[in-house]
Amino acid sequence: MTPLSILDLVRITEETDARGALNNARDLAIHAESWGYNRIWVAEHHNMASIASAATSIVLAHIAGGTNTIRVGAGGIMLPNHTPYVIAEQFGTLAQLFPGRIDLGLGRAPGTDQMTLRALRRTAESSDQFPQDVLELQGYLAPMTSGQRIEAVPATGTNVPLWILGSSRFGAMLAAELGLPYSFASHFAPQLLHEAIRLYRSHFKPSAQLATPYVMVGVNIIAAQTDEEAQHLATTQQMAFTDMFRGRRSLSQPPISDIENYWSPMEKAQAMSMLACSIIGSAETVGNEMASFIDETGADELIVVSDIYDHTKRLRSFEIIADVSGINSVRPAGASV
């Protein structure tokens, strides 16, 4: 059975403020734990009106505090925005508070626009140091070594599992070289999915953290009672991508009956290209397409985005996904990765 996990966007909607979005994320995690999901991650985004997870480590503490067994993590921290030392302190603290449950996925992109990058006091060139920053961060999370003069208290010895996130050859090759698990962002950048997985698996070098390659693949899944209802719910995400192309910073919007009147043919082509790894439909449709997707990619784990406006319907989507996949409250085999 392929483990399933959740990437929660912590959406602020036209009816739900930031506090409501954060509480919804915690509520989703509580339900996901009972349904047998392996982990729930949130991502670092800045200057985005509809996403409340900018202070990622604080959001993770809020989520982890409401759960008991599900793994909680960053998917991811955009490391060029930070010093490795500070991230080690933050995630070491989380690991002390919630031992054995914290993941740290690392991305190379800024997760924002250039103007906001300057507000973060970082530059575009910061990403050039990403491989060295990953190694520095890993060192702070490891046990102290002889002669080490700088300690990231209380991170020392927590060995928080690191993941490399990406949608390109670079991330795949770095994860392989460092012997780290790899999560591919095919839920919004699917173009190089198969090539990146092939490169990662063929070049993987075992490490202290991981003996064999492990790939988690992002996929959008929206499940509902019928195919038609699911397609209707999916228009919320389709509008969000369209607004992104327009440079519009809007809140998450309720689904609409005719998406064709919302986007232009070019915007539709752009959005559908980015959303190519999407499964939308009833339980039967979702079950069949999930099985095909797993066979096609050979994914060791799926991380699911279900970007639905109404929280109750989003919960129902994740419950349907759990039902058709066969996961249950017994922790999947991939839990320790």
Image (cartoon, rainbow, N blue to C red):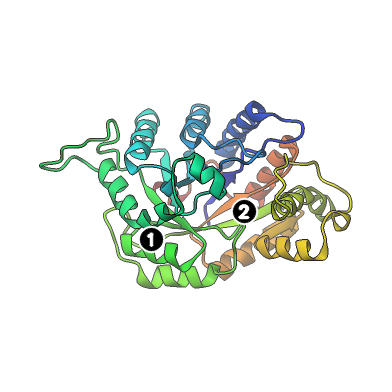
Amino acid tagged 1: Ala
Residue at image coords 10%, 41%: 147
Residue at image coords 68%, 65%: 273
Question: Where's residue 172, x and y in %?
Answer: 43, 65
Total marks shown come to 2
Q: Quadrant of residue 50?
A: top right
Residue at image coords 50%, 45%: 117
Residue at image coords 82%, 65%: 265
Question: Where's residue 15, x and y in %?
Answer: 76, 31
Q: Is residue 315 above or below residue 179?
A: above
Q: Quadrant of residue 193?
A: bottom right
Left-right relation of 44 to 272: left
Which mark is on residue 175? 1
Which mark is on residue 22? none
Residue 330 visible within the image: no
Left-right relation of 149 to 171: left
Question: Where's residue 300, x and y in %?
Answer: 48, 60
* Element marked by disc 1: helix
> As rendered, which of 223 and 21 lies closer to the eye?
21
Which residue corresponds to mark 2?
325
Amino acid tagged 2: Ser
